[in-house]
Image (tube, helix red, strand yellow):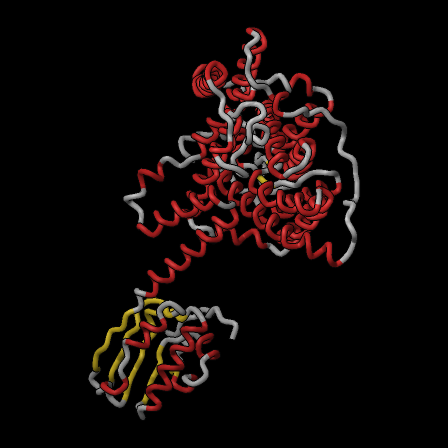
């Protein structure tokens, strides 16, 4: 995306170092989203480990990072509050099954229907969400929003902000982190700049004994290996009906965010991932996670950007990130808990700058107003509600605008030929949006007794177009006039009812296409 010139060459060293960088940044994110969902920190960390590892190994996009996300967490919180965490685990299992079915049915290809303005709105909105999530780290201990590290479940007014020396220390360390990430690549690319920045700032804080918030202040991350456990819920129809709506919503959000992130990584790396394989990978990961006490997850745009920018290209980068995270939980929690939160916030701020399409401001006056509206709409809805709702609304608005624009393109040329016939030449597509305009341009009472309608420069797109032709034929029959329909495809001819015997067949000139209809 904006100003991202990713290194196209992959290597084991780059994958391992970028994986370590991602793992460090995953810790506070996973903990934060666990609090948002109303579960223990380890539930989020286990999800980040298992979803990240499984999707890295069998998913459809090498180099993409998956884990616990805020988009899913805000849906989970109501379920956990009303029914408890065991129902969440059962929901995650069913969510995974739905995602596997989506991949098996090859539904991933429908992500191609997402227009570019919706894609721009998606990355802009998600960049804003990532930015707002970091602002929660500027809250003081004990203040609302401090532990969660996110505004996804609250408002800016709810946070008790840092003040004085504490705030200046936090801002200074964030600025130092961003400075190192930006300028280090100009000197050397031997180590990912994000990893170098985290190490430098951490050593500086420890060496100078600076008083600033660390990962350990957010939550303890020490734990053991995740253990297999069947969700402890009643296996009844009532339970199924409780978890089904949540599972469907979570599956939709997870797939949309994952597939859009996949498209974005495709563009940056100039490679191509498999959307259907990614659906299956996400589904398998969530099924396993549900049985091992994780909150489920999907692709993470922020962590994926860190990985790509740090040189991660292969599956090893995602797998190593997950394994490093597990190592932090098992043996290195005391070290990781000393990392300043400011260093990780600085990394995420760089991600925000790299993710947000600042070029969208420049092109707003150059693209159609309808596309600009869709871009802004998706960005706003992403921030205000959730990603799935934003993308669905964006696609619907874009589709309606497309239909409206093409509805105005159907036009009719009317003239009389040397045989005394009235000839109509149809230009433009005939479908549900243009059917009314099409019929309004004919006047049987004023036409000659012999009428010809030529569809050589038109195409009948759907059942509404067929009905319009049948209605036109009925008008001319009621007026006692002869109607000839030329250059309709064989598909149209077979589907027309009242006008069927008025179609003149020419096997050489008649077009060949199919009409989208359920008739």
Residue drawn at point x = 33 percent, y = 60 percent: 405
Between 217 and 490, the one lying in front of the other is: 217
Q: Which of the 4 quarters of the picture holds residue 11?
A: top right
Horizontal and vertical percent for residue 78?
62, 46
Q: Which of the 4 quarters of the picture holds residue 64?
A: top right
Placement of 389 over or under 406, stated as above or below:
above
Between 472 and 123, the one lying in front of the other is: 123
Residue drawn at point x = 51 percent, y = 30 percent: 159
Residue drawn at point x = 60 percent, y = 54 percent: 106
Q: Quick check: can you spot residue 267?
A: yes
Q: How many marks?
A: 0
| Side of 220 relative to 65 (left or right) | right
Placement of 332 over or under 267, stated as above or below:
above
Q: Which of the 4 quarters of the picture holds residue 458?
A: bottom left
| Quarter of the figure that contains the N terminus | top left
Horizontal and vertical percent for residue 97?
68, 51
Between 353 and 333, the one lying in front of the other is: 333
């Amino acid at each position: 995306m904006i100003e991202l010139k990713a290194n196209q060459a992959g290597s084991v060293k780059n994958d391992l170092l970028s994986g370590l960088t991602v793992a460090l940044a995953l810790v506070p994110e996973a903990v934060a989203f666990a609090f948002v969902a109303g579960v223990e920190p380890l539930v989020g960390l286990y999800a980040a480990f298992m979803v990240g590892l499984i999707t890295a190994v069998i998913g459809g996009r090498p180099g993409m990072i998956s884990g616990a996300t805020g988009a899913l967490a805000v849906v989970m919180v109501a379920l956990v509050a009303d029914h408890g965490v065991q129902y969440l685990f059962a929901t995650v299992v069913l969510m995974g099954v739905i995602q596997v079915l989506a991949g098996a049915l090859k539904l991933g290809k429908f992500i191609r229907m997402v227009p570019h303005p919706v894609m721009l709105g998606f990355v802009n909105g998600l960049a804003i969400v990532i930015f707002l999530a970091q602002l929660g780290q500027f809250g003081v201990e004990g203040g609302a929003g401090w532990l969660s590290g996110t505004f996804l479940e609250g408002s800016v007014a709810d946070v008790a902000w840092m003040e004085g020396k504490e705030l200046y220390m936090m801002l200074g360390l964030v600025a130092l982190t961003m400075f190192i990430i930006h300028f280090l690549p100009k000197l050397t690319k031997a180590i990912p700049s994000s990893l170098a920045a985290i190490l430098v700032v951490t050593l500086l804080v420890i060496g100078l004994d600076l008083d600033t918030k660390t990962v350990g202040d957010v939550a303890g991350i020490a734990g053991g290996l995740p253990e297999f456990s069947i969700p402890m819920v009643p296996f009844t129809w009532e339970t199924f009906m409780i978890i089904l709506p949540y599972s469907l919503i979570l599956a939709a959000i997870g797939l949309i965010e994952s597939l859009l992130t996949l498209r974005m990584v495709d563009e940056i790396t100039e490679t191509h991932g498999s959307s259907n394989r990614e659906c299956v990978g996400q589904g398998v990961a969530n099924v396993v996670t549900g049985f091992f006490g994780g909150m489920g997850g999907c692709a993470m745009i922020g962590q994926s950007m860190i990985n790509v920018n740090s040189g991660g290209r292969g599956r090893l980068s995602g797998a190593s990130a997950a394994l490093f995270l597990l190592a932090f939980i098992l043996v290195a929690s005391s070290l990781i808990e000393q990392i300043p939160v400011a260093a990780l916030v600085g990394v995420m701020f760089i991600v925000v700058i790299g993710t947000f399409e600042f070029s969208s401001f420049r092109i707003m006056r150059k693209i159609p107003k309808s596309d600009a509206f869709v871009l802004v709409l998706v960005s706003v809805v992403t921030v205000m509600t959730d990603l799935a709702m934003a993308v669905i609304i964006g696609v619907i608005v874009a589709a309606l605008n497309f239909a409206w624009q093409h509805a105005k393109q159907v036009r009719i040329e009317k003239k009389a030929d040397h045989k005394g016939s009235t000839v109509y030449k149809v230009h433009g597509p005939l479908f549900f949006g243009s059917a009314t305009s099409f019929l309004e341009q004919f006047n049987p009472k004023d036409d000659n007794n012999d009428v010809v309608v030529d569809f050589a420069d038109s195409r009948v797109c759907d059942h509404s177009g067929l009905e319009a032709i049948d209605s036109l034929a009925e008008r001319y029959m009621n007026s006692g006039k002869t109607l000839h329909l030329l250059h309709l495809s064989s598909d149209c001819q077979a589907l027309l009812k009242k006008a069927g015997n008025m179609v003149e067949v020419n096997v050489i000139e008649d077009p060949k296409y199919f009409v989208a209809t359920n008739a």
